[in-house]
Amino acid sequence: MSIRSQSQIYDPAAATASDTPSVQFEYEIKTLQLSQLTHDLDVSKKRQKAREKYEPLLFWLAFGWLFIVLVILVFQAYGFYGFSLSTAVMVSVVGSTTLNVFGLLTIALKHIFPRSSKDG
C-alpha cells in the first residue's frame, strides 16, 4: 500500500456538486481500510507485549519442570534418602511429564505466535 500526500486524500467537507458517488464510495473504502489497518496494528502491538511477557515465563516453567524430572531420575538412580520407585512409575513420570511440558508449550506458543497469511 502506498503512502499518499495530504492533497491526494478525499476530503468530504470540500466536496462539490460535480463529485460523483464513486469518489465518495472510494473515500469510504479507504476509511474502512485505514480502520482495519489500525486495528491490525493494535492487535500486533498487543501480541508483541504478550510475547515479551510470556516467553521468559514459559521458558522457566519448562526448564523448572524438566529439572524436577532430572532430580527425580538422579534420586532414583542413586537411591538418595531411600528414594525408590518402580520401573513402571518412573516410565509414567518421565513420559507424562515430557508430554505435559511439550503440550503446554505447544498450546501456549500457538496462542502467542499464531499462523496467519499476514505474518508470512
Image (spheres, rainbow, N blue to C red):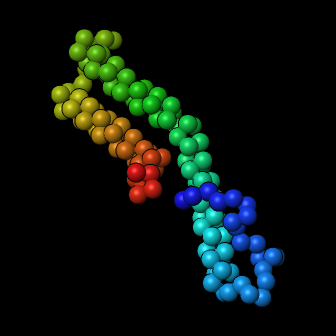
Question: In the figure, is residue 62 to the left or right of 85?
Answer: right
Q: Is residue 16 above or below residue 99?
A: below
Q: Which quadrant of the view contains residue 6? A: bottom right
Q: Which quadrant of the view contains residue 118? A: bottom left
Q: Position of residue 28 (x, y in %)?
A: 66, 76
Q: Is residue 94 above or below residue 7?
A: above
Question: In the figure, is residue 100 to the left or right of 89?
Answer: right
Question: In the figure, is residue 96 to the left or right of 41?
Answer: left
> Is any atom of residue 42 visible in this view?
yes
Q: Is residue 10 above or below residue 5?
A: below
| Label total for image | 0
Q: Which quadrant of the view contains residue 5? A: bottom right
Q: Is residue 52 above or below residue 41?
A: above
Q: Position of residue 67 (x, y in %)?
A: 37, 23
Q: Quadrant of the N terminus?
A: bottom right
Q: Residue at x 60, y 67 (%)?
A: 33
Q: Residue at x 33, y 25 (%)?
A: 69
Instruction: State the residue in front, 83 or 8.
Output: 8
Residue at the extreme right of the image, as rendered: 13
Q: Position of residue 79 (x, y in %)?
A: 26, 13
> Is any atom of residue 89 visible in this view?
no
Question: In the figure, is residue 48 to the left or right of 78?
Answer: right
Residue at the extreme front of the image, as rendered: 18
Instruction: State the residue in front, 20 or 48.
Output: 20
Q: Position of residue 42 (x, y in %)?
A: 62, 53
Q: Residue at x 32, y 21 (%)?
A: 70
Instruction: State the residue in front, 115 or 11.
Output: 11
